[in-house]
Image: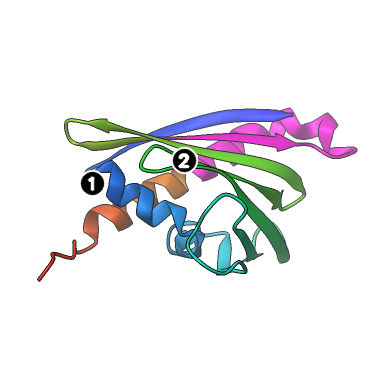
Amino acid sequence: MIRFSNTVEIARPPAEVFAYLADLEHTPEWNWAITNTRKLSPGPVAVGTRYQQTRSVPRPAEEMLEVTGLDPDTRIEVVGDLASFRARLTYELSPIATGTRLTNSVELDRPGALGLFGGLVTGRIQASVAENLGVLRTVLEEREVSTPK
């Protein structure tokens, strides 16, 4: 199993970061490997909400994801198949003076022969995830905040 985490600080309050992340349909806006994410379950996002997403890298694929943990403004957990891995993604949010500290923990099960080479690709995968989190930070920090009328 491959395990790693990345942390990024975002100059937005946890509630705003959580609301954006919890709607997985935003994923293509900050993850360059995902071209489309579509919510399959009716109603608001909750534990059990399912999504289908289209991946372009490392090869085109359709993936199914399910929200397995949701603690408002503090934690989101998603499981599913990502590329050739069975994955568990956890996003933990904590308030800091400048906004939010977001830690993304990733667990990837390595199937078959890939298990022999997983250690060689871990660094590249972790670096790609860190790059995506940097884009997420930029997207959130540059978004206009809607104010109540």
Residue at left 58%, top 29%?
4
Residue at left 33%, top 48%?
17
96 drawn magenta: no
Q: Which residues are magenta?
A: 103-130
Q: Is residue 15 or residue 101 the one in the foreground?
A: 15
CA distance separating discs 1 and 2: 18 Å
Q: Is residue 121 or residue 87 the one in the foreground?
A: 87
**Magenta segment, principal secondary structure?**
helix
Q: Which mark is residue 12?
A: 1
119 drawn magenta: yes
Q: Judge the density around disc 2: few (<14), some (14-19), many (≥20) Cα neighbours within 10 Å.
A: some
Residue at left 85%, top 40%?
111
The answer to whether 57 appears left or right of 93 in the picture is right
Residue 10's spot in the image, x, y percent? Answer: 28, 42
| Rendering quarter of residue 74 | top left
In the image, residue 93 sits, relative to residue 68, either above or below, namely: above
Q: Judge the density around disc 1: few (<14), some (14-19), many (≥20) Cα neighbours within 10 Å.
A: many
The answer to whether 123 appears left or right of 44 in the picture is right
**What residue did someone put label 2 on?**
130
Figure quadrant of the N terminus:
top right
